[in-house]
Image: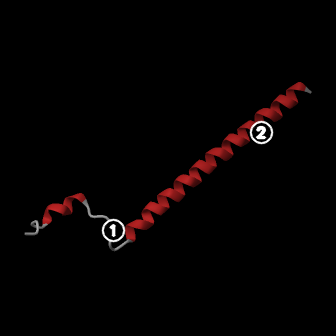
Amino acid sequence: MYEYELYRSTSAELIRRADAEREIGRARRVRRAARRSGRQDPEGKVRQGDRGRFAPAA
């Protein structure tokens, strides 16, 4: 009976770890999607290379 209880405990722990890793993956995908959706903004961030394109104002 001891082996069976040990098996169940180990199995439950592995299931908990897998669930935690899945949640981390979901959170990463959500953050990545949020960053990517902001790129469609017409008034988004200025790229570093575009700053020196025009002369400074007088």
12 with respect to 56 (left or right): right
Q: Is residue 9 above or below residue 19?
A: above
Q: Percent position (x, y) of residue 34?
A: 48, 62
Q: Secondary structure at mark 2?
A: helix
Left or right for 53, reference 7? left
Characterize the local packing of mark 1: few (<14), some (14-19) or many (20 or more) Cα atoms within 10 angstroms: few
Q: Position of 32 compared to 12: left or right?
A: left
Q: Residue 6 location, x and y as percent?
A: 82, 29
Report the residue marked by disc 1: 44
Q: Nearer the viewer, residue 17 or 55?
A: 55
Q: Badge 2 is on which residue? A: 12
Residue at 53% of width from left, 56% of height from top?
29
Q: Secondary structure at mark 1?
A: loop
Three-letter code for the amino acid on which mark 2 is drawn: Ala
Q: Which image quadrant: the C terminus? A: bottom left
Q: Vertical placement of 32 versus 55: above or below?
A: above
The amino acid beneath tag 1 is: Gly
Q: Is residue 43 above or below residue 33?
A: below
Residue at screen point 53% across, 59% down: 30
**Along the polypeptide, which appears first: circle 2 or circle 1?**
2
Q: Of tags 2 and 1, which is closer to the observer?
A: 1
Q: Nearer the viewer, residue 5 or 46?
A: 46
Q: What is the residue that sits farthest to the top in this orientation? A: 2
Q: For this view, does 44 lie left or right of residue 6?
A: left
Mark 2 Cα shell of 10 Å, populated few (<14), some (14-19), many (≥20): few
